[in-house]
Image: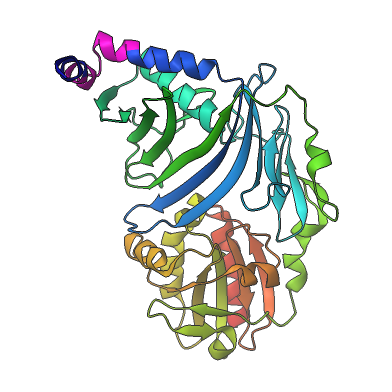
Amino acid sequence: MKALIILAMCLLAGSSLQAQEYLREVLSKLESVKSATYDLYSEGWMAGDTLPSSVSKVFVEEYRNPQDTTIGSSFLEWNSEDQTRFESGYDGAVSVYMNRYQKTAEVNDFSNQFFPVRFIQPPFFNYVTSIIRYTLETKDNVTREVKETEKEYYLKLTIDEGVEVEFFGKPFHFPEMSFMADPIMVFEIWIDKETGLPYKYKRELCGSNSGIDECSNVKLNTLPDKNFDLYALVPEGYELVRMGEKNKYDEEPFKLADKPAPDWTAVNMQGDSVSLSSLKGKVMLLNLTGIGCGVCQLAIPFLNELDKRFDKDKFQLVAIDSWGKPLANVRNYISRHQIGYTFLSGNEQVVIDYKTGGFVPFFFLLDENLVIRKVIKGYAKGTTEKKIIDAIEELLK
Protein backbone atom coordinates (compact mmCIF):
# COMPACT_ATOMS: atom_id res chain seq x y z
CA MET A 1 0.00 0.00 0.00
CA LYS A 2 2.83 2.37 0.92
CA ALA A 3 4.44 1.77 -2.47
CA LEU A 4 1.16 2.59 -4.23
CA ILE A 5 0.83 5.82 -2.27
CA ILE A 6 4.39 6.84 -3.21
CA LEU A 7 3.72 5.98 -6.87
CA ALA A 8 0.45 7.93 -6.86
CA MET A 9 2.21 10.98 -5.40
CA CYS A 10 4.85 10.77 -8.11
CA LEU A 11 2.25 10.40 -10.81
CA LEU A 12 0.31 13.39 -9.51
CA ALA A 13 3.43 15.50 -10.01
CA GLY A 14 2.91 15.03 -13.76
CA SER A 15 6.50 15.83 -14.73
CA SER A 16 8.01 13.23 -12.39
CA LEU A 17 10.27 10.55 -13.76
CA GLN A 18 7.90 7.82 -12.56
CA ALA A 19 4.94 9.31 -14.41
CA GLN A 20 6.93 9.67 -17.61
CA GLU A 21 8.22 6.13 -17.34
CA TYR A 22 4.71 4.78 -16.89
CA LEU A 23 3.37 6.72 -19.88
CA ARG A 24 6.31 5.50 -21.96
CA GLU A 25 5.31 1.94 -21.09
CA VAL A 26 1.76 2.68 -22.23
CA LEU A 27 3.08 4.28 -25.42
CA SER A 28 5.23 1.23 -26.12
CA LYS A 29 2.20 -1.07 -25.77
CA LEU A 30 0.17 1.17 -28.05
CA GLU A 31 2.91 1.09 -30.66
CA SER A 32 2.73 -2.71 -30.62
CA VAL A 33 -0.93 -2.61 -31.72
CA LYS A 34 -0.88 -3.58 -35.40
CA SER A 35 -4.65 -4.07 -35.67
CA ALA A 36 -7.71 -3.92 -33.46
CA THR A 37 -11.43 -4.53 -33.53
CA TYR A 38 -13.80 -2.95 -31.03
CA ASP A 39 -17.20 -1.45 -30.41
CA LEU A 40 -16.88 2.33 -30.18
CA TYR A 41 -19.45 4.31 -28.22
CA SER A 42 -19.37 8.08 -28.68
CA GLU A 43 -21.14 11.00 -27.03
CA GLY A 44 -20.87 14.70 -27.85
CA TRP A 45 -21.87 17.86 -25.99
CA MET A 46 -22.06 21.50 -26.92
CA ALA A 47 -21.05 23.99 -24.23
CA GLY A 48 -23.68 24.19 -21.50
CA ASP A 49 -25.44 20.96 -22.49
CA THR A 50 -26.60 18.73 -19.66
CA LEU A 51 -27.44 15.88 -22.04
CA PRO A 52 -25.41 14.61 -25.01
CA SER A 53 -26.35 16.33 -28.26
CA SER A 54 -25.11 13.32 -30.25
CA VAL A 55 -24.75 9.61 -29.51
CA SER A 56 -23.42 6.93 -31.82
CA LYS A 57 -22.08 3.38 -31.76
CA VAL A 58 -20.09 1.65 -34.48
CA PHE A 59 -18.00 -1.46 -34.88
CA VAL A 60 -14.44 -0.58 -35.93
CA GLU A 61 -11.63 -2.41 -37.68
CA GLU A 62 -8.41 -0.44 -37.17
CA TYR A 63 -5.15 -1.21 -38.99
CA ARG A 64 -1.61 0.12 -38.64
CA ASN A 65 -0.71 1.47 -42.08
CA PRO A 66 2.94 2.58 -42.40
CA GLN A 67 2.35 3.54 -46.04
CA ASP A 68 -0.05 6.27 -44.93
CA THR A 69 2.12 9.31 -44.19
CA THR A 70 -0.83 11.24 -42.74
CA ILE A 71 -2.08 9.39 -39.65
CA GLY A 72 -0.36 6.06 -40.17
CA SER A 73 -3.59 4.07 -39.93
CA SER A 74 -6.49 2.77 -41.96
CA PHE A 75 -9.92 1.85 -40.66
CA LEU A 76 -13.38 0.59 -41.45
CA GLU A 77 -16.56 1.45 -39.53
CA TRP A 78 -19.62 -0.77 -39.58
CA ASN A 79 -23.13 -0.45 -38.19
CA SER A 80 -23.05 -1.70 -34.61
CA GLU A 81 -26.30 -3.66 -35.00
CA ASP A 82 -25.50 -5.02 -38.46
CA GLN A 83 -21.78 -5.52 -38.95
CA THR A 84 -22.27 -6.19 -42.65
CA ARG A 85 -23.53 -2.63 -43.16
CA PHE A 86 -20.59 -0.42 -44.12
CA GLU A 87 -20.66 3.14 -42.74
CA SER A 88 -17.29 4.72 -43.52
CA GLY A 89 -13.62 4.02 -43.98
CA TYR A 90 -10.16 5.32 -44.82
CA ASP A 91 -7.53 3.32 -46.70
CA GLY A 92 -4.63 5.75 -46.51
CA ALA A 93 -5.46 7.38 -49.84
CA VAL A 94 -9.17 8.19 -49.76
CA SER A 95 -12.02 8.15 -47.28
CA VAL A 96 -15.53 6.97 -48.08
CA TYR A 97 -18.64 8.00 -46.15
CA MET A 98 -22.10 6.57 -46.73
CA ASN A 99 -24.77 9.27 -47.08
CA ARG A 100 -28.01 7.41 -46.45
CA TYR A 101 -30.16 10.46 -47.22
CA GLN A 102 -28.99 10.56 -50.83
CA LYS A 103 -27.88 6.93 -51.17
CA THR A 104 -24.42 8.08 -52.15
CA ALA A 105 -20.90 7.01 -51.18
CA GLU A 106 -19.00 10.27 -50.69
CA VAL A 107 -15.36 9.85 -51.68
CA ASN A 108 -12.77 12.31 -50.36
CA ASP A 109 -9.36 12.16 -52.05
CA PHE A 110 -8.22 15.20 -50.04
CA SER A 111 -7.35 17.19 -53.15
CA ASN A 112 -9.41 20.14 -51.91
CA GLN A 113 -7.85 20.53 -48.47
CA PHE A 114 -7.88 23.89 -46.67
CA PHE A 115 -5.26 22.73 -44.15
CA PRO A 116 -1.86 21.04 -44.60
CA VAL A 117 -3.27 17.87 -43.00
CA ARG A 118 -6.01 15.50 -44.04
CA PHE A 119 -9.01 16.53 -42.03
CA ILE A 120 -10.04 13.06 -40.89
CA GLN A 121 -10.78 11.73 -37.41
CA PRO A 122 -8.18 9.03 -36.64
CA PRO A 123 -9.36 5.74 -35.11
CA PHE A 124 -9.24 5.22 -31.35
CA PHE A 125 -5.83 3.64 -30.76
CA ASN A 126 -4.11 5.86 -33.30
CA TYR A 127 -5.60 8.94 -31.65
CA VAL A 128 -4.65 8.13 -28.05
CA THR A 129 -1.18 7.11 -29.21
CA SER A 130 -0.68 10.58 -30.70
CA ILE A 131 -1.92 12.30 -27.54
CA ILE A 132 0.34 10.31 -25.19
CA ARG A 133 3.38 10.76 -27.45
CA TYR A 134 2.68 14.51 -27.52
CA THR A 135 2.33 14.51 -23.72
CA LEU A 136 5.81 13.07 -23.38
CA GLU A 137 7.57 15.12 -26.07
CA THR A 138 5.89 18.51 -26.43
CA LYS A 139 7.44 21.87 -25.64
CA ASP A 140 4.02 23.56 -25.79
CA ASN A 141 2.43 25.30 -22.83
CA VAL A 142 0.74 22.31 -21.20
CA THR A 143 -0.05 20.91 -17.77
CA ARG A 144 -0.20 17.19 -17.06
CA GLU A 145 -1.86 15.23 -14.29
CA VAL A 146 -1.85 11.48 -13.72
CA LYS A 147 -3.91 9.79 -11.03
CA GLU A 148 -4.34 6.19 -9.94
CA THR A 149 -7.48 4.35 -8.83
CA GLU A 150 -7.99 0.70 -8.01
CA LYS A 151 -8.55 -0.36 -11.62
CA GLU A 152 -7.15 2.39 -13.80
CA TYR A 153 -4.81 5.29 -14.35
CA TYR A 154 -6.14 8.65 -15.42
CA LEU A 155 -4.24 11.18 -17.55
CA LYS A 156 -5.37 14.78 -17.91
CA LEU A 157 -3.59 16.99 -20.42
CA THR A 158 -4.43 20.71 -20.66
CA ILE A 159 -3.07 22.62 -23.66
CA ASP A 160 -3.01 26.43 -23.54
CA GLU A 161 -1.43 27.51 -26.82
CA GLY A 162 -3.97 30.19 -27.79
CA VAL A 163 -5.18 28.05 -30.72
CA GLU A 164 -6.86 24.69 -31.07
CA VAL A 165 -4.46 21.74 -31.10
CA GLU A 166 -5.60 18.51 -32.75
CA PHE A 167 -3.96 15.22 -33.61
CA PHE A 168 -3.73 13.82 -37.12
CA GLY A 169 -0.92 11.35 -36.56
CA LYS A 170 1.05 14.36 -35.35
CA PRO A 171 -0.12 17.44 -33.43
CA PHE A 172 -1.46 20.25 -35.60
CA HIS A 173 -2.00 23.82 -34.37
CA PHE A 174 -5.04 25.32 -36.05
CA PRO A 175 -5.22 29.01 -36.86
CA GLU A 176 -7.47 30.83 -34.42
CA MET A 177 -11.14 30.69 -35.44
CA SER A 178 -13.50 33.49 -34.49
CA PHE A 179 -16.26 31.24 -33.11
CA MET A 180 -13.91 29.75 -30.49
CA ALA A 181 -14.39 31.71 -27.29
CA ASP A 182 -11.65 29.88 -25.40
CA PRO A 183 -9.11 27.75 -27.30
CA ILE A 184 -7.83 25.88 -24.21
CA MET A 185 -7.86 22.16 -24.98
CA VAL A 186 -8.33 19.42 -22.39
CA PHE A 187 -7.72 15.76 -23.15
CA GLU A 188 -8.50 13.05 -20.60
CA ILE A 189 -7.48 9.42 -21.07
CA TRP A 190 -8.47 6.43 -18.92
CA ILE A 191 -5.99 3.53 -18.94
CA ASP A 192 -6.98 0.04 -17.83
CA LYS A 193 -4.47 -1.38 -15.33
CA GLU A 194 -5.02 -4.96 -16.43
CA THR A 195 -4.24 -4.38 -20.10
CA GLY A 196 -2.03 -1.32 -19.70
CA LEU A 197 -3.93 0.30 -22.60
CA PRO A 198 -6.38 3.23 -22.87
CA TYR A 199 -10.04 2.37 -23.23
CA LYS A 200 -11.66 5.82 -23.08
CA TYR A 201 -10.79 9.41 -23.84
CA LYS A 202 -12.52 12.77 -23.57
CA ARG A 203 -11.70 15.76 -25.74
CA GLU A 204 -12.88 19.20 -24.66
CA LEU A 205 -12.48 22.57 -26.33
CA CYS A 206 -13.22 24.91 -23.45
CA GLY A 207 -16.21 27.15 -24.07
CA SER A 208 -17.26 25.20 -27.16
CA ASN A 209 -17.80 21.44 -27.23
CA SER A 210 -16.64 18.11 -25.88
CA GLY A 211 -16.87 14.45 -26.73
CA ILE A 212 -16.16 11.04 -25.24
CA ASP A 213 -15.12 7.89 -27.12
CA GLU A 214 -15.07 4.57 -25.29
CA CYS A 215 -14.13 1.22 -26.78
CA SER A 216 -15.21 -2.21 -25.56
CA ASN A 217 -14.97 -5.83 -26.70
CA VAL A 218 -11.43 -5.09 -27.85
CA LYS A 219 -9.43 -7.69 -29.76
CA LEU A 220 -5.84 -6.83 -30.63
CA ASN A 221 -3.64 -8.03 -33.49
CA THR A 222 -6.12 -10.62 -34.73
CA LEU A 223 -6.88 -9.11 -38.14
CA PRO A 224 -4.91 -10.41 -41.11
CA ASP A 225 -2.84 -7.93 -43.05
CA LYS A 226 -4.90 -6.75 -45.98
CA ASN A 227 -5.28 -3.92 -48.42
CA PHE A 228 -9.04 -3.59 -48.41
CA ASP A 229 -10.97 -2.14 -51.33
CA LEU A 230 -13.25 0.59 -50.00
CA TYR A 231 -15.21 0.79 -53.24
CA ALA A 232 -16.07 -2.92 -53.06
CA LEU A 233 -17.74 -2.27 -49.69
CA VAL A 234 -20.24 0.26 -51.07
CA PRO A 235 -23.72 -1.34 -51.06
CA GLU A 236 -25.55 -1.95 -54.28
CA GLY A 237 -27.74 0.99 -55.26
CA TYR A 238 -25.36 3.62 -53.87
CA GLU A 239 -23.69 6.01 -56.28
CA LEU A 240 -20.08 7.16 -55.89
CA VAL A 241 -19.70 10.94 -55.68
CA ARG A 242 -16.52 12.91 -55.13
CA MET A 243 -16.46 15.46 -52.34
CA GLY A 244 -15.58 18.96 -53.51
CA GLU A 245 -16.90 18.31 -57.01
CA LYS A 246 -20.38 19.15 -58.23
CA ASN A 247 -22.74 16.28 -58.84
CA LYS A 248 -26.40 15.87 -59.64
CA TYR A 249 -27.30 15.61 -55.95
CA ASP A 250 -25.83 19.06 -55.27
CA GLU A 251 -28.34 20.50 -57.72
CA GLU A 252 -31.41 18.83 -56.20
CA PRO A 253 -32.20 21.56 -53.59
CA PHE A 254 -31.96 24.26 -56.28
CA LYS A 255 -34.56 22.42 -58.39
CA LEU A 256 -37.10 23.32 -55.69
CA ALA A 257 -37.00 26.96 -56.80
CA ASP A 258 -40.37 28.25 -58.09
CA LYS A 259 -42.13 25.24 -56.58
CA PRO A 260 -44.33 25.06 -53.46
CA ALA A 261 -42.12 24.49 -50.42
CA PRO A 262 -42.49 21.00 -48.95
CA ASP A 263 -44.55 21.20 -45.79
CA TRP A 264 -42.89 20.28 -42.52
CA THR A 265 -43.72 19.96 -38.86
CA ALA A 266 -41.14 20.97 -36.27
CA VAL A 267 -41.19 21.67 -32.55
CA ASN A 268 -40.84 25.06 -30.86
CA MET A 269 -39.10 25.63 -27.55
CA GLN A 270 -42.33 25.15 -25.61
CA GLY A 271 -42.61 21.67 -27.08
CA ASP A 272 -45.50 22.57 -29.40
CA SER A 273 -45.71 21.44 -33.02
CA VAL A 274 -45.38 24.10 -35.69
CA SER A 275 -46.10 23.45 -39.37
CA LEU A 276 -44.93 25.43 -42.38
CA SER A 277 -48.50 25.75 -43.62
CA SER A 278 -49.46 27.57 -40.42
CA LEU A 279 -46.92 30.32 -41.23
CA LYS A 280 -48.35 31.27 -44.60
CA GLY A 281 -48.90 34.95 -45.38
CA LYS A 282 -45.41 36.51 -45.11
CA VAL A 283 -42.17 36.34 -47.00
CA MET A 284 -40.01 33.81 -45.15
CA LEU A 285 -36.32 33.03 -44.99
CA LEU A 286 -36.09 29.38 -43.98
CA ASN A 287 -32.66 28.46 -42.63
CA LEU A 288 -31.87 24.75 -42.37
CA THR A 289 -29.04 24.61 -39.87
CA GLY A 290 -27.26 22.13 -37.63
CA ILE A 291 -26.29 22.45 -33.98
CA GLY A 292 -22.57 21.77 -33.90
CA CYS A 293 -21.88 23.36 -37.31
CA GLY A 294 -19.20 26.05 -36.91
CA VAL A 295 -20.14 27.93 -40.09
CA CYS A 296 -23.77 28.02 -38.94
CA GLN A 297 -22.65 29.65 -35.69
CA LEU A 298 -20.80 32.32 -37.64
CA ALA A 299 -24.05 33.23 -39.43
CA ILE A 300 -26.03 33.84 -36.21
CA PRO A 301 -25.11 37.54 -35.69
CA PHE A 302 -26.13 38.32 -39.26
CA LEU A 303 -29.42 36.44 -38.89
CA ASN A 304 -30.18 38.24 -35.63
CA GLU A 305 -29.73 41.59 -37.42
CA LEU A 306 -31.67 40.38 -40.45
CA ASP A 307 -34.62 39.47 -38.26
CA LYS A 308 -34.81 43.11 -37.09
CA ARG A 309 -34.20 44.67 -40.50
CA PHE A 310 -37.55 44.05 -42.18
CA ASP A 311 -41.18 44.76 -41.27
CA LYS A 312 -42.48 41.96 -39.04
CA ASP A 313 -45.86 42.17 -40.76
CA LYS A 314 -44.25 41.27 -44.08
CA PHE A 315 -41.21 39.14 -43.24
CA GLN A 316 -40.33 36.24 -40.93
CA LEU A 317 -37.12 34.34 -40.31
CA VAL A 318 -37.36 30.69 -39.28
CA ALA A 319 -34.44 28.38 -38.56
CA ILE A 320 -34.73 24.61 -38.12
CA ASP A 321 -32.10 22.35 -36.59
CA SER A 322 -32.04 19.64 -39.25
CA TRP A 323 -29.56 17.43 -37.40
CA GLY A 324 -32.18 16.15 -34.96
CA LYS A 325 -30.66 17.32 -31.69
CA PRO A 326 -32.66 16.83 -28.45
CA LEU A 327 -34.94 19.72 -27.53
CA ALA A 328 -32.95 20.49 -24.36
CA ASN A 329 -29.81 20.95 -26.44
CA VAL A 330 -31.63 23.21 -28.88
CA ARG A 331 -32.83 25.38 -25.99
CA ASN A 332 -29.27 25.64 -24.66
CA TYR A 333 -27.97 26.55 -28.13
CA ILE A 334 -30.53 29.35 -28.49
CA SER A 335 -29.70 30.74 -25.07
CA ARG A 336 -25.93 30.48 -25.43
CA HIS A 337 -25.89 32.23 -28.81
CA GLN A 338 -28.63 34.73 -27.89
CA ILE A 339 -30.74 33.85 -30.91
CA GLY A 340 -33.64 36.25 -31.30
CA TYR A 341 -35.40 34.78 -34.32
CA THR A 342 -37.72 31.76 -34.47
CA PHE A 343 -35.71 28.57 -34.00
CA LEU A 344 -37.31 25.13 -34.21
CA SER A 345 -36.24 21.56 -33.56
CA GLY A 346 -36.59 19.43 -36.69
CA ASN A 347 -35.89 15.90 -37.85
CA GLU A 348 -34.46 14.05 -40.82
CA GLN A 349 -37.67 14.36 -42.85
CA VAL A 350 -36.92 18.02 -43.59
CA VAL A 351 -33.50 16.92 -44.88
CA ILE A 352 -35.13 14.39 -47.17
CA ASP A 353 -37.87 16.73 -48.43
CA TYR A 354 -35.53 19.67 -49.06
CA LYS A 355 -32.90 17.34 -50.57
CA THR A 356 -29.97 18.87 -48.66
CA GLY A 357 -28.29 15.56 -47.88
CA GLY A 358 -27.65 16.84 -44.35
CA PHE A 359 -25.48 19.74 -45.56
CA VAL A 360 -25.85 22.97 -43.58
CA PRO A 361 -26.46 25.83 -43.71
CA PHE A 362 -29.06 26.13 -46.46
CA PHE A 363 -31.32 29.14 -47.00
CA PHE A 364 -34.68 28.91 -48.77
CA LEU A 365 -36.51 32.17 -49.51
CA LEU A 366 -40.30 31.67 -49.69
CA ASP A 367 -42.94 34.12 -50.84
CA GLU A 368 -46.15 34.77 -48.92
CA ASN A 369 -47.77 31.75 -50.61
CA LEU A 370 -44.92 29.47 -49.49
CA VAL A 371 -43.42 29.11 -52.96
CA ILE A 372 -39.64 28.85 -52.96
CA ARG A 373 -38.15 31.80 -54.86
CA LYS A 374 -34.44 31.41 -54.14
CA VAL A 375 -32.08 28.79 -52.73
CA ILE A 376 -28.68 29.66 -51.24
CA LYS A 377 -26.15 27.09 -50.06
CA GLY A 378 -23.53 27.77 -47.38
CA TYR A 379 -22.50 30.97 -45.66
CA ALA A 380 -19.66 33.38 -46.37
CA LYS A 381 -19.60 36.65 -44.45
CA GLY A 382 -20.47 39.55 -46.72
CA THR A 383 -21.10 37.57 -49.91
CA THR A 384 -23.96 35.39 -48.66
CA GLU A 385 -25.39 38.26 -46.62
CA LYS A 386 -25.71 40.47 -49.70
CA LYS A 387 -27.34 37.67 -51.71
CA ILE A 388 -29.94 37.11 -49.00
CA ILE A 389 -30.70 40.80 -48.40
CA ASP A 390 -30.99 41.57 -52.11
CA ALA A 391 -33.33 38.59 -52.65
CA ILE A 392 -35.58 39.59 -49.73
CA GLU A 393 -35.76 43.22 -50.85
CA GLU A 394 -36.64 42.14 -54.39
CA LEU A 395 -39.44 39.90 -53.09
CA LEU A 396 -40.84 42.60 -50.78
CA LYS A 397 -41.17 45.20 -53.57
Position of the N terminus by quadrant: top left
The overriding secondary structure of the stretch rendered in magenta is helix
Quadrant of res 285: bottom right
Query: Residue 120's x, y, as percent?
Result: 59, 35
Residue in the foreground of this view, choosing between 337 and 84: 84
The residue sitting at 36% across, 32% down in the picture is 190
Viewer can see residue 385 = yes
26 shown above or below 235: above
In the figure, 202 relative to 235: above or below?
A: above
- How far across and down, in percent of the image, does residue 278 sit? 55, 90
Q: Would you place residue 27 above or below residue 257 in this image?
A: above
162 part of magenta stretch? no
Q: Which residues are magenta?
A: 8-21
Q: Nearer the viewer, residue 33 or 141?
A: 33
Q: Quadrant of residue 390?
A: bottom right
- Residue 281 position in % (x across, y down): 56, 91
Dividing the picture into quadrants, the one containing residue 155 is: top left
| Image mark count | 0
Q: Is residue 119 left or right of residue 325?
A: right
Whether residue 172 is visible here, answered yes or no, is: no
Q: How is the image coloured?
A: rainbow
Location of residue 48 with respect to 125 vertically, above or below: below
Which percent across, then down, holds residue 322? Answer: 56, 65
Residue drawn at x 48%, y 55% is 54
Residue 130 in the figure: left or right of residue 252: left
Q: Quadrant of the C terminus?
A: bottom right
